[in-house]
Amino acid sequence: MSEIVWDSVGARLYETGVKNGVLYPQISDGTYPLGVAWNGLIAINEAPSGAEANPLYADDTKYLNLMSAEEFGATIEAYHYPKEFGVCDGTVELATGVEIGQQTRKTFGLCYKTVVGNDVDGIDYGYKLHLMYGALASPSEKAYGTINESPEANTFSWEAKTTPEPVSGKKPSATVVIDSTRVDSGILAAIKLILYGTVGVNPRLPSINELVTLVAGGVPPAVSLTSIAPADELGNVAINANIVLTFNNKIHSESVVVTTAAGVVVAGTKTWDTAGKVLTFNPNADLTNATVYIVTIGGVVDIYNQALATAVKNFTTIAL
């Protein structure tokens, strides 16, 4: 062990600010598939509670302490909010620009960034990404006042309580913090791609277990199609054949389409293997003999929000 040194150069850390807020409304299957920017965030005051010692006594002395369950909540303050937050705040749009309140409040997730500074680089040293899951906003007061000689913008505030989600090998949790100064830069880039999206790929909030898998597995390889059966430009394919596509990464979404060369869409059923890497397309009826079929591999996005460039393959069925 080395001697303790206080206040060495570069070790005087501090945190400040809040920015780059992203709202992720939850849908019925429990996922958060689409994020939207939350402009105008003023403050997010995290308020964990619980985890209090409850003493038990026996034989006229303290026997042990039992800890109460811990909960995570926060107060969100902002000058305004995205329209997608309306359903989370108990409002429903009856028509464009017309809303009613006191409706069922929807669960949401949240991502925001705080700055990590030090005595050398200042606020350019790094940042932390804060992720919140399973949040429900309580009704809040909205105060409107007249414009006067010293006008101020109205501010909004919501208290949110969370429901933790399962985490493999750990207790359930509703919060994750990712420190850019400590996490691998490649993994950080992959996480930001998921959270913020990119051209043609929607931002989303991954589950905590997805993050655990990503961190444990290291920097993900670029998504690719490793094989397709029937093979590209193969002839004499059986009319009862399935189309099987294998990818190197687990796939989050796709829009693979099978058609004839004339553009007629082939109806069928898609199934995935348990690893989420092998897609099998089973046509509802046998294919037509002596026919060219086109497989358009489009819309493929893996769980790391990496998009695969659209590819077109073909095969020809056997002539009977």
Image: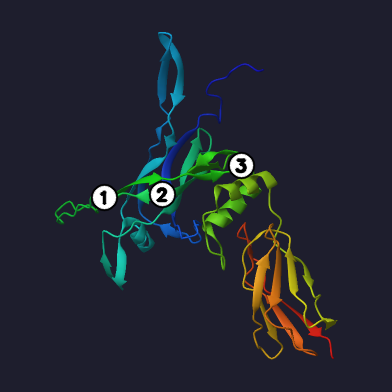
Answer whether residue 252 is visible to the viewer in this image: yes
Judged from the image, the secondary structure of the residue bearing numbered disc 2 is: strand
Q: Quadrant of the C terminus?
A: bottom right
Q: Nearer the viewer, mark 3 or mark 2?
A: 2
- As displayed, is residue 215 above or below residue 24? above
- Say which quarter of the image contains residue 239: bottom right
Q: Nearer the viewer, residue 75 or 21?
A: 75
Task: Identify the secondary structure beneath mark 1.
Answer: loop
Q: Nearer the viewer, residue 288 or 182?
A: 288
Give residue 220's position: percent from left, percent from top. 69, 53
Give the percent coordinates (x, y) of residue 122.
49, 38
Residue bearing mark 3: 183
Real-space Cα separation, disc 3 to disc 2, in angstroms:
26 Å
Residue flagged by tag 3: what amino acid is it? Val
**Amino acid type of the residue tagged 2 in the rendering:** Ala
Q: Which residue is mark 2?
A: 135
Question: What residue do we see at 41% from left, 27% from top?
Answer: 52
Q: Could you tell me which residue is drawn at 41 percent across and 54 percent down?
A: 107
Among numbered discs 1 and 2, the one appearing first in the sequence: 2
Q: Earlier in the sequence, mark 3 or mark 1?
A: 1
Q: List the single residue furthest toward the front.
A: 59
How far, Cα to Cα, is label 1 from label 2?
A: 15 Å
Q: Is residue 150 above or below residue 179?
A: below
